[in-house]
Image (spheres, rainbow, N blue to C red):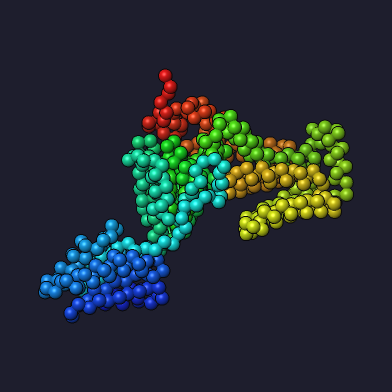
Amino acid sequence: MKKIEKVSSKNIEIIKLAIGNSPDFYSRTIKIGKKQISYVYFESVSSDDKISDFIMKNISEDVKYNKTTTFFTDLFTRLENTIPNSKLSTADDFDSIFYYLSSGFTCIFVDGSEKAIVLETRTQLDRGVTESSSEPVIRGPKDSFTENHNMNLGLIRKRIKDPNLWFSEITVGRRSKTKVAVAYIKDIVDLKRVNDILKKLKQIDIDAILDSGYIRKFLEGKQRSTFPQIITTEKPDMVCGELLDGKIAIVVENTPFVLITPTTLISFLHAPTDYYEKASNVTFSRVLRTLAFFITIITPALYIALTTFNHELIPDEFLISIAMQQQGVPFPTFLEVLLFGITFEVLRESDLRAPSAAGTAMSIVGALVLGDAAVSAGVVSPIVVIIVAVTSICEMAFSDIDMINALRSWKIIFIFTSVFMGLIGFLVAMLILIIKLVSMETLDVPYLVPFSPLDLRAWKDSIIKFPINRLTKRPRYLTDKNQTRLKEEN
């Protein structure tokens, strides 16, 4: 950790050598007699206007009105105390200097001093607060997180104006030095979980953290599962709601996606807008999402098992209809489902990657044309098109991409077990899925709570949604502190 030199010109040469004489590096030296003041910054992340306002005007005034012999010896202290910038501090080593320069700060070196004055002059490099593109809402707040770290903290702070809202911030990444803030409400959350998360974050030794997705695996631990164990969201109102329940949020610099933990399976059946609508409508929506969850996983596999191995379980009229549709189709049933399912997945992936103007049109035309052409050509039967289409539509009931990928993975597992063992294989896969879900935990919170273990109080906000005035207590599986969140009516 190299210390700052007393001669400002030497400091500039050290910085230039370290950064390879980068084209966005700028330095200026102001001579006063036989001595000099130098300031340096990166043009790509700093604002020239702020530098002129905060630095040049101040130095010019000092040079103009201070002609005494003590002027230069007192200059460092004078600048430190008079530059009009609220984010001003000092640094005494080059590791700190490089961090500040990359963060949009300007560094001032004064001959004779082994410290540098650093002040915030960063320019606006991120977008303003906009509506979420990944989690659109019909009713409720429209704002979403951005790439600006302080702005993200502010979007949480303006909703929860409570001194018990704490942010514990650390820096992660040897080269990126990314700020990671752990947000929680001190008098609600289980502090042991907060300490566990902070411990895991401090143990991360990686070059750079470019997105919150980088640290997901470090937080999830050694549990291997396709099902997501951490919620990712762009919605500040959703984060605040989870914090008030006793959960923890991880806000990562330079990304609009905030992580929420601990997480249960039931959390992915909820939506941020559930708390802004009538309870009966929300219950209906959650029931639909639950049905979509099971339809996505089991429908293709159940169809394969019944039509390939267990014909006796299908009504005769329906079995005859299926047999007539499959006449002339050259592929076995499982291959039909697999090939057409892969085609739909490729179509969906193309829709996600294509420009928004062309994506929707491409997916609709592709689905209609491919489906109709495949049936007309006798490549697949009409019922397979229906099953694959229904399954794909049910996947879209979930906004979390990790949950969609998990459903896709288990759908394939169910298909292959049904291909080889029919209904028995289907039941084996179902048993494995249940065992896997029951055995999962996130920060000591069971993944299937409130169903396993049973928590009747939490049932009020599970698949069934009670009115907001009936949700008077916080979930016991999240916290045992400050359980009352709504004073009951007399």
Query: Where 175 falls versus 476 (above or below)?
Result: below
Give x and y (percent) for residue 153. 40, 49
The residue at the point 45 percent across, 59 percent down is: 126
Give x and y (percent) for residue 242. 46, 39
When asked about the image quadrant of residue 16, the answer is: bottom left
The residue at the point 75 percent across, 48 percent down is: 337
**Can residue 200 be spotted in the picture?**
no
On screen, residue 45 versus residue 457, left or right, reads: left
On screen, residue 479 versus residue 287, left or right, reads: left
* Residue nearer the viewer, 148 or 211: 148
When asked about the image quadrant of residue 357, the answer is: bottom right
The residue at the point 46 percent across, 39 percent down is: 241
Residue at the bottom extreme of this rendering: 34
Total numbered badges shown on the rendered structure:
0
Q: Where's the C terminus, which quadrant?
A: top left
Give x and y (percent) for residue 330. 85, 51
When asked about the image quadrant of residue 361, the answer is: bottom right
* Residue nearer the viewer, 120 or 166: 120
Q: Where's the N terminus, which quadrant?
A: bottom left
Residue at the left extreme of this rendering: 69
On screen, residue 89 versus residue 286, left or right, reads: left
Give x and y (percent) for residue 329. 85, 50
Query: Where 127 falls versus 446 (above or below)?
Result: below
**Can residue 178 be spotted in the picture?**
yes
The residue at the point 37 percent across, 32 percent down is: 481
